[in-house]
Amino acid sequence: MAIALFVLPLVFALAALAVPSPRVRPWLVPVGGGLQLVLVLLAVRDGHGTAYSDWLVIDKLGRVALPLVSGLFFACSLYVPTYLRLRPGRPNRVLCGALLAFLGMMTLIVESQHLGLMWIALEANTLVSAPLLIFNQNPRSIEATWKYLLIGAVGIALALLGTLFLAYSALHAGRHGSLLIADLVLDARLLSRPWLHTAFVVLLVGYGTKMGLAPMHTWKPDAYGEAPGLVGALMAGGLTTCAFLALLRFYQICAAAGEGPFARELLVVIGLLSMAVAGVFMARQPDYKRMLAYSSVEHMGILVLGIGVGGLAAFGSMLHLVNNALTKGVMFMAAANIHRAYGAKTIDRVSGALRRVPASATLFLVGFFAVTGAPPFAPFLSEITILRGAVANGRYGIAAAFLVLLFVVFVGMSATVLAVVQGEPPKDLKETGYRDSLGTVGPALLLLVAVTILGVWVPAPMDAAIRAAAVYVETGR
């Protein structure tokens, strides 16, 4: 079944490209996403077919990440038919095919146990992202796409270089140079330390670029700001999840080699830096979609910070991986609806959204409280777990900096969010014809319900899977 999980979306992608009807084509996205989600849940629940040779395996990390990216994609896919019906002037053939191919490549990244295959899947994911980013076909979206491709190309090239350094560290130690993760973890104690250190630093920069960690985040504000909302949701919750997973594979090897402290200190530094940069650029940010991009930079920093602290914080990081992805889906789809209603995305042209699009504005406002870690939403639970882990490990300075940066981000985001939802709509606002509907509000509401439930109750199977993934990251077992 492991091979079917990424082949199925690719088959539907080809079908979307082949189907002549622009009215039928959008429905292939939720159908393909729904069928793939069912297969994923069956594979994870029963454990049957979770491996296809040594190269494709749903391991303990995959048992968390794969249902997450598939579930997020399915929720976003429910938005697709209504969204494309609101955009009759834009051809949808390439968009529908690229969305399904995007799902296929995310699945392949998660399943890949060979570092070369994982790199290829990430590169393919970058390429199929381009038609999604350029969908609006305006000068700003074209510029954002080129910036994404150029910076992403540098990042993925560095990731390849780091992978080669890691392979050489095995050859230098007299090993056979396998790029299978299981082999590298098994031989980790024998790897050449200088080459292993070099490999991890280069890989952190390479895959950190794909995640959008500071200072490699410069593509994010433009890409997220100009992409359709559902694409921003998939990139902020799906693509970044896959890039983080790739980085964790290399951290596992470092930890197994006894070089965990070296890797963890780097992760702590870049995690706090990402949060600080995000906080600075969110202050007085007039563009609410770019604000969400900086929020993604912040949360990528939180993820690597938790792994860097280790112990209980590593569990909090894996839990936050889930919570962040679901919350970003709420925020990006709500922001997309507000953008559609106003035809603008800056606070000088957007105000009084609670009056004009009350359902979307409410989701945007509640999503803001969720994404900034307010109780009772799920990000509060994962962020407080990371904080507890830092205190338990005696990292009081890190805990204090973490709290301060969370407060800075909350204050910075609140100014923009409140400016959007409060007040009166501009008097010269042109009528766009957009009104909230079940098709545009329902998917975001579904994700918000999940975020709220996970804030007060984490199902036992999910809790066990996340705990197993956290232990697996730190021990390789």
Image (cartoon, rainbow, N blue to C red):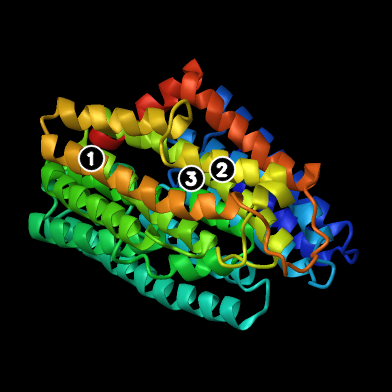
Give the residue furthest to the top.
460
- Give the crowd class for mark 1: few <14, some 14-19, many >=20 residues within 10 Å: few
Res. 31 image quadrant: top right
Which amino acid, mark 2?
A: Leu
Q: Nearer the viewer, mark 3 or mark 2?
A: 2
**Mark 2 sits on what residue?**
365
Return the x and y of residue 314 as percentages of the image width and height: 28, 34
Residue 132's label in the rendered image is: none
Residue at the bottom extreme of this rendering: 139
Residue 458 shows in the view = no
Q: Estimate the spatial distance between the alpha carbons at disc 1 and disc 2, rounded to whole Å.
A: 48 Å
Q: Earlier in the sequence, mark 1 or mark 2?
A: 1
Instruction: Answer left or right for 228 relative to 255.
Output: right
Q: Quadrant of the N terminus?
A: top right
Q: Which residue is mark 3?
A: 111
**Residue type for callout 1:** Leu
Quarter of the figure with the C terminus: top left
Q: Please, is residue 178 above or below residue 308 in the view? A: below
Element at label 2: helix
* Residue 284: percent from left, percent from top: 41, 62
